[in-house]
Amino acid sequence: MATLTLIGTRLAQEGEEFVYRGEAPGCEGCPYRDQCLNLVEGRKYRVESVREGASTLECAVHDAGVTAVEVEPAPVRANVASNAAYAGSKASLEGPCPHTECPSHEFCEPAGADFDREYRIDEVLGEPPHDYCMLDRELTLVEFAPPDQ
């Protein structure tokens, strides 16, 4: 079910994905707080639609203001241990990786997923983008299902 919220106008495009980071210092005292701060912190979302005719409201955080959109939790692509990579099963991330130059780093430490949680695998995508893991991990690229709530 889509959630109506306010986001920066630069992000307000259908299909745009973002991770909600919670309240910023500029949010204090804002009259639109309840409409902006209604998502789950740390969760990845996809803009499903931009409200037609919605006003652009002034915002202390977003320089071009905010506008109304409908968002849904978005799936997260991640590398998991190959022996746990089955559609429908649950898996967790293997842990932090210091090798930021690796083409798989964004999947080993994906935005919108935590190391201390398990996620349901929606789809197994296959081989990760790296040639070999510098931490000697056997990994498979999967897509975690978006959380229900």
Image: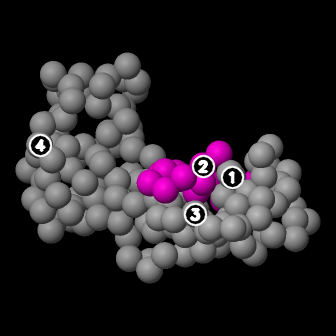
Regarding residue 118, the answer to whether it shows in the image is no
Q: Which residue is mark 4?
A: 126
User: Residue 13 appears at what percent x and percent y?
Assistant: 54, 52
Judge the density around disc 4: few (<14), some (14-19), many (≥20) Cα neighbours within 10 Å.
few
**Mark positioned earlier in the residue sequence (1 or 4):** 1
Residue type for callout 2: Leu
**47 relative to 22 in the view: left or right:** left
Q: Quadrant of residue 6?
A: bottom right
Q: Which residue is mark 1?
A: 8
The answer to whether mark 1 and mark 3 are in CB contact below 8 A is no
Q: How far is the residue under mark 2 from the one under mark 3? A: 10 Å
Q: Which mark is residue 143?
A: none
The answer to whether mark 3 and mark 4 are in CB contact below 8 A is no
Residue type for callout 4: Gly
Q: How far is the residue under mark 1 from the one under mark 3? A: 11 Å
The answer to whether mark 1 and mark 2 are in CB contact below 8 A is yes
